[in-house]
Image (cartoon, grey):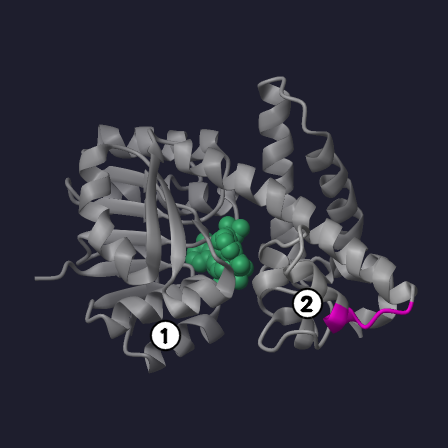
Amino acid sequence: SKPNVAFIGLGNMGAPMAENLLKAGYKLSVFDLSAAATTRLQQAGASVAQSPKEAVSHAQVVISMLPAGQHVHSVYLGESGSDGLLVELNEGTLVIDSSTIAAADARKVAEAASKLGIDFLDAPVSGGTGGAVAGSLTFIVGGDSAAFAKAEPILAVMGKNIFHAGEHGAGQVAKICNNMLLGILMAGTAEAINLGVKNGLDPKVLSDIMLQSSGRNWTLEVYNPYPKVMENVPSSNGYQGGFMSKLMQKDLNLAMQTAQDTEVETPMGAKATELYASHTVENGDKDFSSIIGRHDVSLLS
Ligand code: NAD
């Protein structure tokens, strides 16, 4: 029979991921600080807990989808480092954190979990909110093989491609490499479309051309940054929802920190980090494709 799952963090990604588990017949107990977030899940059939502790009280599996490392730290380790959720869990509980955080933070939680006989996996995702809704995410997992095997059937409900990247933290390293490249591709794609438009081209015509040419990439395929070129993407919806610019900036900062710590050169990543840092001053809550507004602020309104 299916394990009881506790799901913590029901934002742009967590909500549709949790809904897919419900649809697949998992019993879900959920918690989020935002009442709007929990109401959506209650309507989908989850039981809403009033605290993280209540959410995990009958759970064999805990999944979290939180903004950043500080939230993951405070949920699992607590303010003191030992008064968080981990100490509430039974031995043998499987904890899957799908937030994008520093590999060092993931290893710290994994180590504390391991001392308590709890299996912890870092399992960040790629695929965007579209992938979360469709259940076609890519999971990039770090941790023990036995825990990975236990997690696989659950991850398969929310994702299509499930990779075991290596030991604890390896999932996060792979994820920030991917997102550094995504930041570069989004900024570059926005720049290219803007250049064409400013030289008289229709953004849709130019996008179709590049999509069948050597500039082809994921942002052109499913996440065009120019308004109204594509349906059902944040750029055609006032840059609401999706992947907030401030979260992209967080990921670029993680990549830059990793590069600095290991003395690896990342000049393109550094440029994308600089662009997103200035963009988020005014547009942190807008989807990251709004970076095109650097070239033409009227596109953002
Ligand atoms: P979000 O801000 O939409 O959702 C985060 C949720 O966590 C919010 O509902 C918030 O209320 C909740 N939360 C914060 N602190 C909490 C706490 N202490 N206890 C309970 N709930 C708490 O962010 P998102 O877009 O869903 O992203 C979540 C993570 O996934 C981030 O690390 C992000 O980088 C990563 N990610 C996002 C996307 C995307 O396309 N949005 C894609 C891949 C990965």
Q: For the magenta stretch, what is the residue range?
A: 200-205
Magenta-colored stretch includes residue 202: yes
Q: Secondary structure at mark 1?
A: helix
Magenta-colored stretch includes residue 300: no
* Quarter of image, res 233: bottom right
Q: Is residue 205 above or below residue 94?
A: below
Q: Is residue 296 above or below residue 78?
A: below
* Quarter of image, res 90: top left
Circle 1 residues within 10 Å: few <14, some 14–19, many ≥20: many
* Quarter of image, res 210: bottom right
* Outermost bottom residue: 43
Q: Which residue is mark 1?
A: 41
Q: Which residue is mark 2?
A: 208
Q: Amino acid at mark 2?
A: Asp
Percent coordinates x, y for residue 196 in the rendering: 85, 62
Depth check, front residue: 51 or 76: 76
Query: Does residue 206 appear left or right of residue 185 in this picture?
Result: right
Depth check, front residue: 21 or 179: 179
Q: Nearer the viewer, mark 2 or mark 1?
A: 2
For the C terminus, give its image quadrant: bottom right
Q: CA distance from mark 2 to mark 1?
A: 38 Å
Circle 2 residues within 10 Å: few <14, some 14–19, many ≥20: some
Q: Is residue 284 above or below residue 104?
A: below
Depth check, front residue: 68 or 193: 193
Percent coordinates x, y for residue 217 in the rendering: 61, 53
Q: Is residue 191 something that shows in the picture?
A: yes
Depth check, front residue: 55 or 264: 264
Q: Amino acid at mark 1?
A: Leu
Residue that appears at 74% across and 48% down: 276
Residue that appears at 70% across and 57% down: 284
